[in-house]
Amino acid sequence: MAVVYSPGYEIRLGGLERLHAFDIHKYSRIYGALVKAGSLDRKKVLAPVPVTDEQVLLVHSPEFLASLKDKRAVARYLEAGVLRLLPESLLERKVINPFRRATGGTVLAARQALRCGIAINIGGGYHHAKPHAGEGFCLFADMPIAIRVLQREKSIKRALVIDLDVHQGNGTAVCDNGDDSIYTFSMHQGNIYPIPKEASDRDVELAPGTGDREYLALLGDELPALFDLASPDIVFLQAGCDTLKGDPLASLAMTEEGIVTRDSMVIDACVKRNIPVVMTLGGGYSRDAWHVQYASIAAILAKYRQATPECAEGSPPPPPPGKTRLPEQKYWKKVP
């Protein structure tokens, strides 16, 4: 397997970042816990370069890119009024650059998934960002950007996005609207943000209080049809854990064990079909959100790291029949 992470994902504003509902420091907690538990060898974790303007413009408009110079616009996109007080240089360095790097992480994870089979970005999943604006603490549409990069490089033709965050992936739906090469699936709570919803290729709305048994049964029924309809060359899993019981921004009732099983169901379905899969972390706003995603990633690593070639370093494994080997990537950096 390949795991992608950088300390550069963190937003640090002297503690002001803790005033926001989203815990931006969960990424470092997850990474640290995986290393401490021996689930992850820090020497084999890959750190990405930030996404470039050229890559951003594959999905976003020039007007959006220009708006990132406007403190008021960025504060609105990230739902953080305090950002209006920052100097522009500090905003770029401390806020926008972490989102650029985490988005670059999804791009790198996507390339690695094609080499290894499974890749996890300990970050990303910014599924509310739209072509002309950020939204809901999402600045760049990292999954659509990664798909466009791979398509431009002629590495893939078709992609499937499986969005299991408790909030609908409205931005992803808008970014990929009208493109038959990308199939978007969102399974989310129906009576919360965003309202109104956008139209994914397939939307499944859940009632408040939905727990493990009902959720997992429904997902199990949906997955086979998704692969048949999408015929994907790669799958992107948005594994938001705000489906957890007690999340302050939602009201589903899943347990940690249920979410770990949920994520494994998707990974297993991709492995069974020999389809590369990228996992991104998405949302989660409870105090225990980081631990849920730590447990999920640890379970996936435990199951597949021995069965998957060590392809984060050295030569890639032989390509599947009919596939073209990807060129070596010489610019990867190791995480400190």
Image (cartoon, grey):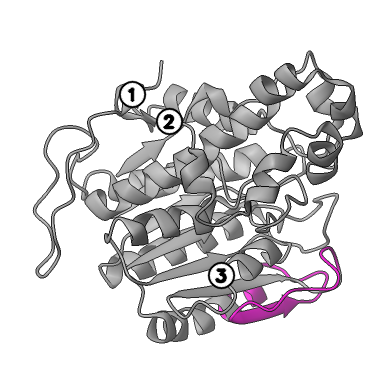
Mark 2, other Cα within 10 Å: few <14 / some 14–19 / many ≥20: some
Say above or below: 89 vs 64. above
Which numbered marker is on residue 176? 3
Q: Are marks 1 and 2 in contact (CB under 8 Å)?
A: yes
> Distance between the Cα atoms at labels 1 and 2?
8 Å
User: Who is closer to the viewer here, 280 or 64?
Assistant: 64
Q: Position of residue 40 (x, y in %)?
A: 37, 31
State the residue at coordinates (71%, 37%). Answer: 68
> In this rendering, which labeled residue sits more in front, label 3 or label 1?
3
- What residue range appears in magenta? 192-217
Q: Does the magenta segment cover residue 16?
A: no
Q: Amino acid at mark 2?
A: Val
User: Who is closer to the viewer here, 97 or 206?
Assistant: 97
In this image, 326 relative to 33: left or right?
left
Q: Does the magenta segment cover residue 203?
A: yes
For label 1, the residue is 333
In this image, 193 relative to 182: left or right?
right
User: Who is closer to the viewer here, 73 or 230?
Assistant: 73
Q: Amino acid at mark 3?
A: Asp
Q: Earlier in the sequence, mark 1 or mark 2?
A: 2
Mark 3, other Cα within 10 Å: few <14 / some 14–19 / many ≥20: many
Q: Position of residue 264 (x, y in %)?
A: 45, 59
For label 2, the residue is 49
Q: Are marks 2 and 3 in contact (CB under 8 Å)?
A: no
